[in-house]
Image (cartoon, rainbow, N blue to C red):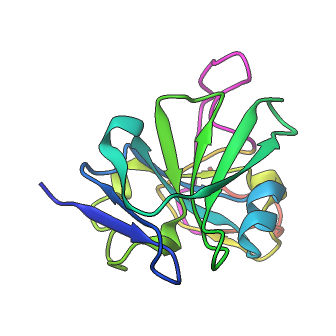
Amino acid sequence: MRAYNVGCLCGNLRYKATAPPLRVNYCHCRFCQRITGSSHLVEPVFEKADFGRTSGSASVYKHRSAGSGKLIDIHFCATCGTKLFMTFERFPEVVGVFGGTFDDAAWAEGTQGVTRHLFLREAQPGTVIPAGVPCFEQHAITNDGEPLDPKVYSEPHVVGTGPPAP
């Protein structure tokens, strides 16, 4: 079984995932744009039981989601400021890890079948969405827990260039 090692910039905080991610979200919402300082967050999601601390203790910033009204706990290093992972009041059984914190840059190998893009309606213009990947204009489920049907593009789509061909 492959282990996924995660750490902050200064090395004070170390975590490990002991199973592959359940899914990998490419989230384009404004929250994820702000929290990463980038166009989107790459967020592998693990079962909470498969993710744990190996050294150090993270600080936590509590943020209330504008969409669901539920709390999101952002776990970060108080020394270097690296955001490592999030836990969710709405999804208590999982942990969302910041993709850039993995020791091995090839952590995403084999995750194509569990990848999805979220909040395309908030994506930066010019963002390229690959063909064959489930996409959602908002979240993949409603606040009531109902799953939404994805849109899957037959060819790469550039956000902000007009209606894509499904």
Q: Which residues are magenta?
A: 138-156
Query: Extreme right residue here?
Result: 66
Residue found at x 74% / y 54%: 120
Q: Is residue 121 above or below residue 106?
A: above
Q: Is residue 76 magenta?
A: no
Quadrant occupied by the N terminus: bottom left
Residue found at x 29% / y 68%: 109
Q: How many marks?
A: 0
Q: Is residue 40 above or below residue 73?
A: below
In percent of width and height, residue 163 lies at 79, 57
Q: Is residue 143 magenta?
A: yes
Say left or right for 157 vs 161: left
Q: Is residue 144 above or below residue 120?
A: above
Residue found at x 62% / y 49%: 166
Type of secondary structure dominating the magenta stretch:
loop
Say left or right for 162 vs 22: right
